[in-house]
Image (cartoon, rainbow, N blue to C red):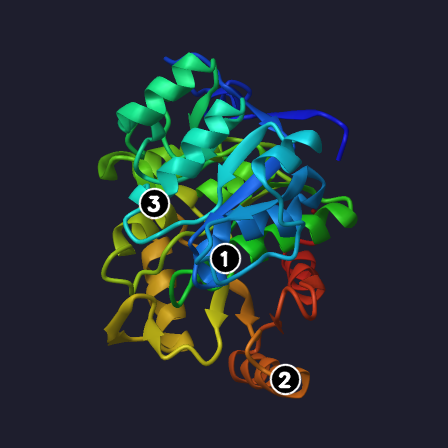
Amino acid sequence: MNRETEIDSTVSIMRRIRSIPLNSVPMRIQTPYLLFLADAQEVLSLKVAKGIVDWRPELCVGEIALPDCAVTLGVPQLTLTEAKERGAKTMVVGMNNSGGTIAANWIPTVLEALDRGYDIASGLHQRLGSLPEVRDQARRNNCQLIDVRHTEIELKTGTGLRRAGKRLLTVGTDCSVGKMYTALAIEKEMRARKFDADFVATGQSGIFISGKGMAIDCVVADFISGAVEQLSPDNAANHWDIIEGQGSLFHPSFAGVTLGLLHGAQPDAMVLCHAENRNFMRGMRAHKLPGLRETMELNLQTARLTSPDARFVGIAVNTVDLSPKDSQAVLEKYATEFELPCVDPVRTGVASIVDRITDLWPSD
């Protein structure tokens, strides 16, 4: 925890991705992090913070929360002073509420952190600097306000033209079913096997974890597919971009982002992600969760507009609510029904999915 690391935020990292013009000044996110859990009532709302803890634990000094916070991520619970003494440089807003806004009861903690010299980094839709008191406090203390969800990168509309290299996209029956975790696990397994593979972050959590990417849900709709084309440009024939999916084609709130991502990704391979025992779309009890086959068919139909040979190579199921025995039964059931590798990335790993990729693209 005492080593200092710096990772580039969205803007500065993108300077290293070819063919993407920039029109902004680079920022830098200083680490280690102190994770601000705010008043979270469920772990599901802490996707940003939990993703960092799970995939970059060496960057986490600890967590800080408001008194009515009901959850913890299992890292040290610290005050701002204690975390500073342990080397924390940036307080990361680790909660993502509905609408992505900065709640009024969070502001005192943010202001106190700025007063103690912390930079503040957020993946929310609302910009930190939109709050005058936060903006003024940051200026007085010469601290950075870093909004990783927003980019000033010049974007173009999608072309649908075929690009060199190979791409895998995770898609889902719903939001928050494990698309990012599955993509990261596949990248890790591929690299262990000496594949030329890179995780491509399309959300704020992935950006904090990997140090690069773009939050697609904050891109103007006409430019979503073009943004994904730029995130995953022409590459070597045997290179795999493992693209983090967003939303679901069946979610009334977020289907538009999913659609643009599918077209821009031009996936050769897709992995279906699903949360077992979830009956309704997240935050939408009027809308039942679609079936796995129904989801696969619509994603294939949609993907084939720009990638005619797109195919599914596996299914990833979040079975956290099941016993080990029941989890294994569910995985075996789906594997038999769909004749595809079926895994829980946390419980079983994703080796069988990468085996399938190796069988289908043996030269890679």
Gap between marks 3 and 2 measured at Cα: 38 Å
Label 2 crowd bin: few (<14), some (14–19), many (20+), radius 10 Å: few
Label 3 SS: helix
Task: Give, as a three-letter code, the residue at label 2.
Answer: Ser
Q: Give the label, 1 or 3, closer to the camera.
A: 3
Residue type marked 3: Asn
Along the line of sight, the residue nearer the viewer: 309 or 187: 187
Instruction: Tell me the residue that label 3 is attached to.
Output: 105
Q: Give the structural element (helix, strand or loop) at label 1.
A: helix
Q: Position of residue 146 (x, y in %)?
A: 44, 27
Q: Is residue 339 above or below residue 309?
A: below
Ranked by sequence position, the earlier of labels 3 and 2 is 3
Q: Is residue 300 left or right of residue 79?
A: left
Indicate which disc, 1 or 2, sits on the residue closer to the N terminus: 1
Q: Position of residue 180 (x, y in %)?
A: 52, 53
Q: Quadrant of residue 33?
A: top right
Q: Amino acid at mark 1?
A: Lys
For image coordinates 78% across by 49% down, the residue present is: 192
Classify residue 219 as left or right of residue 328: left
